[in-house]
Image: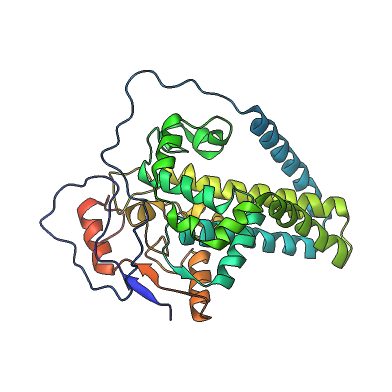
Amino acid sequence: MTSTSTIVTARSQKPAPASSAAEPAAPPEFVDDRPPVDDIFDTTYAEKEGAKPPMRLVWRNIVLMAALHLSAVYAVILVPFAKPLTWLWAAFCFLLSALGVTAGAHRLWSHRSYTASTPLKVFLAISNSMAFQNHIYEWARDHRVHHKFSETDADPHNAKRGFFFSHVGWLMVRKHPDVIEKGKKLDLSDLKADPVVMFQRKYYKPSVVLMCFVLPTFVPWYYWGETFWTAYFVAAILRYTLVLNATWLVNSAAHMFGNRPYDIFINPRENRFVAFGAIGEGFHNYHHTFPYDYSTSEYGWRGNLTTFFIDTMCWLGLASNCKKVSQEVILARRRRTGDGSIRSG
């Protein structure tokens, strides 16, 4: 059994129509006495009038992204020639990398939706370095900005700027000034006070070289005689590229394609394909409606490998205090602001 708490109030990103049916509340089993995470949509924010600032390309990132994806295409050609153990190792590294983002940078550090022991934090930080998607501090900061100013100029990967921009284009241009301005104003004291986050931030570059490229290449080459070339392109480059795109699909596809059973007034959608690729992060309409829920879904383990991982860590005593929305609150919210695509019971 996991240690969970029932959240008293369902938080929303945008104002919803008034309803005569109040959302029921239940007393929490766990009270987080730290300041709340600054990840709730800011209804007072207004985009600046007038012309948008000119788009400034970051050519270094454009060249690196192009080279990475061309290398990944080449790696696909090598896959049939790789040893089966190399396939399994690449899949294992994919899972570790993904957990470093989903269970680590996202659910633990961005939203603080559960509590992790120091050994679990260290494991997730190492896995996050294997994912190579910016260090935890920067990832969590940008993600909180994304929730607080979703689909506006202050959103780092604003989906209203198109699929390509929200998927990868936002990494190829300079950030909009509002993204930088709002990011500087967030309360990130909890991240600064976490020694694991600060240690990873300090030693991020060498940790990425070791975990994202050296280790995935070395193990197949040394332990079962895979060629160094194949090990590098399949277990390092192809695996890394797949993890990147699985994460990016949460920013792009899950903001454009799917239903909105919890809140039709926000853009994020429920996308089962994305949930599969991003090991549970595609239930995005639910997540933006209830960003503090550790499961990012009301369905537990169904299509949500990250939730299974966190629950396992709770069973092992390495995690606790998982924040969860009560079923009564979920049903009330569906009836009040959902699109009716899921029967409310």
Position of residue 11 in the picture relative to residue 273 (left or right): left
> For the point 72% across and 52% down, which residue is it?
206
| The N terminus: image quadrant | bottom left
| The C terminus: image quadrant | bottom left
> For the point 32% across and 53% down, which residue is it?
289
Residue 96, above or below 31: above
The image position of residue 304, as x and y in percent, is 49, 64
> For the point 42% across and 64% down, which residue is it?
295
The image position of residue 276, as x and y in percent, is 53, 57
Residue 138, above or below 56: below
Say which quarter of the image contains residue 74: top right
Residue 55, above or below 188: above
Which colour scheme appears in the figure?
rainbow
Tell me, yes or no, if residue 133 can be seen here. yes
Viewer-closest of 178 and 22: 178
Q: Pick out the residue farthest to the left.
A: 20
Say which quarter of the image contains residue 99: bottom right
> For the point 81% across and 63% down, which residue is it?
219
